[in-house]
Image (tube, coloured by chain):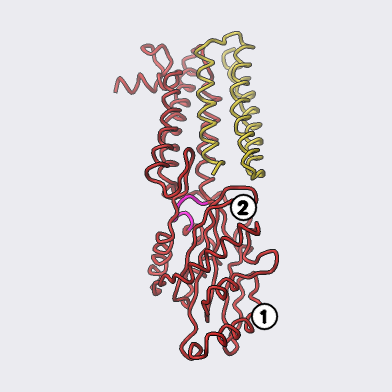
Chain colours: A red, B yellow
Amino acid sequence: MGLLAHLLIPHVRNNHHPHLLRPHGLGIVFLFLILVSLINNQFFSERQKVLGFATNIKSEELINLTNKEREKKGLPTLKENSILSQAASLKAKDMFSKNYWAHVSPDGTTPWEFFKSSSYFYSHAGENLARDFYTSSAVVSAWMESSSHRENILNKSYEEIGMAVIDGVLEGEETTLIVQFFGTPQKPLLSSISSDQTANSSVTGETEGQPSRVAAELKPTGSKPLAVLPDSSRDQSGLNLKPLPLETLTTTQKIYVAVLLLLLVTLIVDSFILFKRRINRQGSHSVLHAGLILLLIVLIIYSSRGAII
Amino acid sequence: MFFGYFLRHLGQFAAFILTIILIIGLLYLIGDTFWRLTIIFAISAVYLGFGLAHHQEEKNLNFSTILEYLFIALIILITLYSIFIR
């Protein structure tokens, strides 16, 4: 207890200067943060990065979390389909190569083109997109908070799912893109037709009724497929400052927040005690440091939230 | 007198932190890694510079104070780097 007080609280025995706030204490905090990043990124992260917060998003985890949300509503789980995952991967690569962040590419390519080019012929299809997240649970939480993305996840018409998690540079920024494709293969009645004919009927179906960017379900007419895209405009617009559950942070981010919180509390207590006792101590000002550390904590927490469309 | 000194500093510090917040806002507008790194280094350097200039003005700048600002600036640097350089 005495050691903790010596470390964190200003009093006569530490000359009114807690050791954590002295140069050696702050130096140890800095080295500890570097060490945490290095160890976590080298040994526990999926993606290799020397410093900083590495993303830890896995396709299998995203599928499991999506299925858990469906199970909660009593819906059947979705089976992973490697062709759908391949189509999702093509979509992610297309976004990187053409440098866009949207359901429909600037040249008008819809997500359904990637279904077709991967030879996945569907009666129902849907797409959810996400970027800049750090953990799988944060991605699924964000989708579930958005009514139109939630509708896609909980759509009882879907039977299969495909996922792609791909790193790259988008709009000049290193990012991780997540593409979630939903699908229901065309039923035997249609699959009895030769694959060429099926492909043609799908193309015809969509050119006659292009899937809109908004969450509009195209009315099925004959074999016309049903394709659904989320409508982000239905969600709350602007900066989303809803409190975030801390479990959406990576281990490194949690350790950073914990260490910075300890530093923040020590700085606030230090300022308060010095002010109360009217002590004019030589050294840097804890109030200024506290303001900056608080800002860093807020930034870490809110930067863990990426974007969805 | 003590209270007035404290309040005067609080005002200065609040203005300084607001300026830092505005500069950090730039990081959200600029996606390019080079410019992000430049801004992050600039924020850390400005923090160090402000702290040293402030204590120099108050004529109580010493080696220990320099090290304290240096390490806080380094903590700012590593944290902002972790957040904005993916």
| B17 lies above or below A278 | below
Within the image, what quadrant is residue B6 found in?
A: top right
- Image point (29%, 23%), residue name: A1
Q: Residue A177 at what x, y percent from top left?
A: 54, 56
Q: Residue A107 at what x, y percent from top left?
A: 70, 66
Quadrant location, the C terminus of chain B: top right
In the picture, the disc for residue B84 is none
Q: Residue A82 at what x, y percent from top left?
A: 44, 70
**What amino acid is labelled 2 in the image?**
Leu
Q: Tell which of A15 and A276 is nearer to you.
A: A15
In the image, farthest residue toward the left = A1
Q: CA distance from mark 1 to mark 2?
A: 29 Å
| A189 lies above or below A38 | below
Instruction: Rate crowding at label 2 as few (under 14), some (14 to 19) or many (20 or more) other CA atoms within 10 Å.
Output: many
Q: Tell me where the magenta segment starts and ends, as one range.
A: A133-139
- Image point (61%, 47%), residue name: A173
Which chain is home to disc 1? A
Instruction: Rate crowding at label 1 as few (under 14), some (14 to 19) or many (20 or more) other CA atoms within 10 Å.
Output: few
**What amino acid is labelled 1 in the image?**
Thr
Within the image, what quadrant is residue A292 found in?
A: top right
Which chain is home to disc 2? A
Quadrant location, the N terminus of chain B: top right
- Image point (66%, 65%), residue name: A105
- Magenta run includes residue A103: no
Q: Tell which of A235 and A253 is nearer to you.
A: A253
In the picture, the disc for residue A207 is 1
Determine which residue is flagged by label 2.
Answer: A170
